[in-house]
Image (spheres, rainbow, N blue to C red):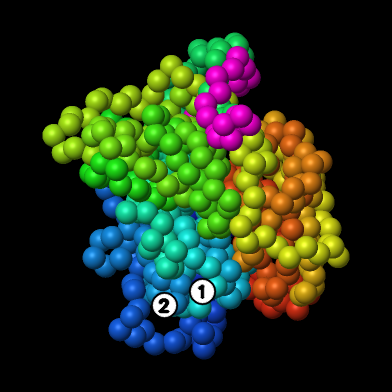
Amino acid sequence: MLRRSFLQLGVLGAVVSGVSLELVRKTQAKARSAWERFISQPTFQRPRNSETVVLEVTTAPITVLGQSVVRGCIRQLNGQRGYTTSQNKGINLELINQLPVPTTVHWHGLILPNAMDGVPFVTQPPIPPGQRQRIHYPLVQNGTFWMHSHYGLQTQSYVAEPFVILNEEQEHWADRTITVMLRDFSFTPASEILNNVVAGERGGGTAMAKSLADFAWHQPRRLLTQQWDPATQRFGRKQEKGVLMMAPDVVYDALLANERSLDAPEIIDVEPGETVAMRWIAGSAFVSFFLDLGDLEGELLRTDANPVEPICGSVFQLSVAQRVTLRIKVPEEPGVFPLLALGERSNLRCGVVLRSKRKLSVPDLAPQTDQWTGSLDFTQDKQLRARQPLAARAANNTIPIALTGPAPNYTWGLNDRFYPYRDPYWVEEGQRVEMVFSNPTPMGHPMHLHGHEFQILEINGQPLAGPMRDTVYVPKGGTCRIAFDANNPGIWAFHCHISYHHARGMFNVVAYRSADLSWWNPTGFSHEHLPF
Ligand SMILES: [Cu+2]
């Protein structure tokens, strides 16, 4: 543990009795020289120009349940969180690490050059405090994405923001477009939550976990989930008796929509009768969501960044790291319309409020209710059809992925192995690759592949021409088959997007035989989760 802390560039002079300062200096010098070698490559030496947007990785205060707390953020110099560009402009950024600890930034869902992918110890060394990294690449996609740190548990600390790529379709799809970033919040720091769950404390030792110490998790109760109604061809609410069994690994204190808890939600003034496209991003570290539009009806246009044949409904599923675009028509009759995100296996909620008459007051909305939700499942993905599917083709590389865990000491894995190890899933350029997931673990996992989009081709044994995605939620007991074309050479992270599972071994890489593996250093994976 002491030795590992020396790997942290950010901790200057971590002098511990019995350990030589010389060793600290040597380790820091080595990490520093890796960074300097990396950043001196010509692609990162491209000068800034007048179009370059600077993004600071830093901290900012937010207010949760009336309390001010400081968390991370990625913002432009004008203070705006996140980044919006257009497909023809491409990406032209400079990152500055203003945190006191190392970081990297990953562009979630992007098909991009491998060197820009932002995964520490896979595609690059961490960015030391005070250092800068140029990010520039052409865009072959558009839609709703997000950017987040891939270092430690920094997604949980909100080094994570919306990243939107416009094209012409999106400029005309509604009268206005609104982005809602969803997060899970705890007053307990992420590193402490992880230590607690590793020590076997269910709920992660948060304030809410403590307040629910006597809660009867094993008692049957009515749980809210989503259902598909074949008669009306829409998604709606389902309330069914079910059992939560036990506390989730992490029990949060609140959920946030655009950095606000539901006691003080964002109120968005709209016009009666207009259409609103809502980009929902699950930027959470552990919690997946059911979106509940209440009295309104939404038309699902895209899953992740990808167009689907539109389907209507009032309840939608959104797992960790996924995005969904819903087009909503504001009723002609003026009113106030809360749009809520309910945490999976939770009674917490957050959301935003649409208001179509300025004078109307917004009713109090409780951040926590008596209504518990069940687990996400395949109900939604089973109905969705890609509008731009992969070309029909037989696979020439099939990779079985059995999700594994939890093993002792809260380790999670893939195919009974726990990262770090040096045994990638190999692919060759030009292959049609399929991954076949099975999930015998006691919970669902949002599985994410970097640098590619994939299509869901089979769910629980049933073939389908399902949605294109970059993150698929594989529910407890579920199986599915996905396919992608190996047309973007490199070494690409592949992992569960629950931060605590990722950090505890549910991670590997997909490596092209042709890839440059020189920045891949699995031993760096077990770096400490430094609070800031
Ligand atoms: Cu997981």
Q: Is residue 169 above or below residue 344?
A: below
Mark 2: secondary structure: loop
Between 401 and 121, the residue placed more toward the observer is 401
Q: Is residue 16 left or right of residue 470?
A: left
> Which residue occupies 61% across, 29% down?
231
Q: Is residue 124 above or below residue 378?
A: below
**C-beta proximity under 8 Å, tags 1 and 2:** yes
- Disc 1 marks a residue whose amino acid type is Leu
Q: Residue 132 at what x, y percent from top left? A: 40, 74
> Which residue occupies 44% across, 87% down?
46
- Binning the other alpha carbons within 10 Å of mark 2 as few (below 14), some (14 to 19) or many (20 upward) gives few
Occupied quadrant, residue 508: bottom right
Q: Which mark is residue 238?
A: none
- Disc 2 marks a residue whose amino acid type is Lys
Between 13 and 270, the residue placed more toward the observer is 270
Mark 1: secondary structure: loop
The CB of the residue at mark 1 lies under 8 Å from ligand 1: no
Q: Which segment is the magenta one? A: 228-253
> Which residue occupies 56% across, 23% down?
238
Q: Is residue 135 left or right of residue 274?
A: right
The CB of the residue at mark 2 lies under 8 Å from ligand 1: no
User: In this view, which residue lies farthest toward the left?
Assistant: 359
Q: Which mark is residue 89?
A: 2
Check residue 201 for magenta coloring.
no
The residue at which mark 1 appears reads as 139
- Binning the other alpha carbons within 10 Å of mark 1 as few (below 14), some (14 to 19) or many (20 upward) gives some
> Which residue occupies 19% across, 37% down?
357
Return the disc, 1 or 2, that comes first in the chain's sequence: 2
Q: Residue 413 at what x, y percent from top left? A: 72, 46
